[in-house]
Amino acid sequence: MPNLYVKPLRGLPARAALLFTCWLARAGAALLLLALLPLAAGAQALLASAGGTHTLSIHPDGTLWAWGNNASGQLGDNTTVSKFVPVQVGTATNWASASAGANHSLGVRTDGTLWAWGLNSTGQLGDNTTASKSAPAQVGTATNWASVSGGASHSLALRTDGTLWAWGSNGNGQLGNNTTAQRAAPVQVGTATNWASVSAGNGYSLGVRTDGTLWAWGFNSNGQLGDNTLTDQLVPV
């Protein structure tokens, strides 16, 4: 590296001025990198979802991307090889939303169809099997799905008519259908038609209705349902 002479800055020793100048150069390079990041194809994300050890992201062009652990096929790229950079999931360009569970993934397309892939040991993919999938598989034939949420080993989804559906593991009543029986296909949660949003956790579930009320059900050993008890609930309370 060539010798560099830096004129002292307002009484600073030359060495201190040199270190300060180097710091400014590095800071400038960092700011330039941050400015250029949005121009990178991999950074143009519209929304993202973090799962157990994998991540999903939808780009403005409707494509779906995934990266991270892929031992159960949760990246949906038709392999079980983990990826350290985003890889496109199939070729579809009409993904509207996606949710990463612990080891499975779910997505809704703009045509209202619901898709799932990854670990399926408890039926969390909702395709009426317990066979894991390494590429998106359609869940039923309905075309009125609005949103979806993946939990540890169960899944929740809303339809455009405001109904709530659940499937997968149900040992703690997290499906909200007043049983603890596992389900490999979507079952309706109660009869309410005013669900606005839902979230699937680790053995429990939460939902908000259009009237602003909050509901919870499933595992409650740590009071995670917020109902002032430690009792599991098999239906929304």
Image (cartoon, helix red, strand yellow):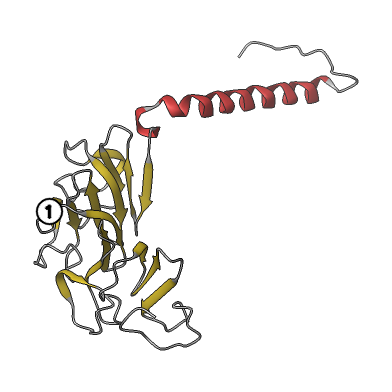
Disc 1 marks a residue whose amino acid type is Gln
- Residue 105 on image: x %, y %: 25, 55
The residue singled out by tag 1 in the image is: 138
Query: Is residue 228 shown left or right of residue 142?
Result: right
- Residue 226 on image: x %, y %: 48, 78
Residue at point 47% right, 81% down? 222
Where disc 1 sits, the SS reads strand
Q: Residue 225 appears in which quarter of the rendering?
A: bottom left
Q: Residues within 10 Å of mark 1 (few under 14, many from 20)?
A: some
Residue at point 16% right, 64% down? 126
Query: Is residue 127 shown left or right of residue 124?
Result: left
Q: Residue furthest right?
A: 11
Foreground residue, 217 or 27? 217
Foreground residue, 55 or 19? 55
Q: Residue 179 appears in which quarter of the rendering?
A: bottom left
The correct choice, above or below, for 96 with respect to 204 in the image is above
Residue at point 77% right, 14% down? 6
Foreground residue, 22 or 198? 198
Indicate the quadrant containing the C terminus: top left, top right, bottom left or bottom right: bottom left
Query: Is residue 103 shown left or right of residue 213?
Result: left
- Residue 86 on image: x %, y %: 30, 39
Q: Residue 121 appears in which quarter of the rendering?
A: bottom left
Foreground residue, 198 or 117? 198
Residue at point 17% right, 65% down? 120
The correct choice, above or below, for 63 with respect to 1 in the image is below
Indicate the quadrant containing the N terminus: top left, top right, bottom left or bottom right: top right
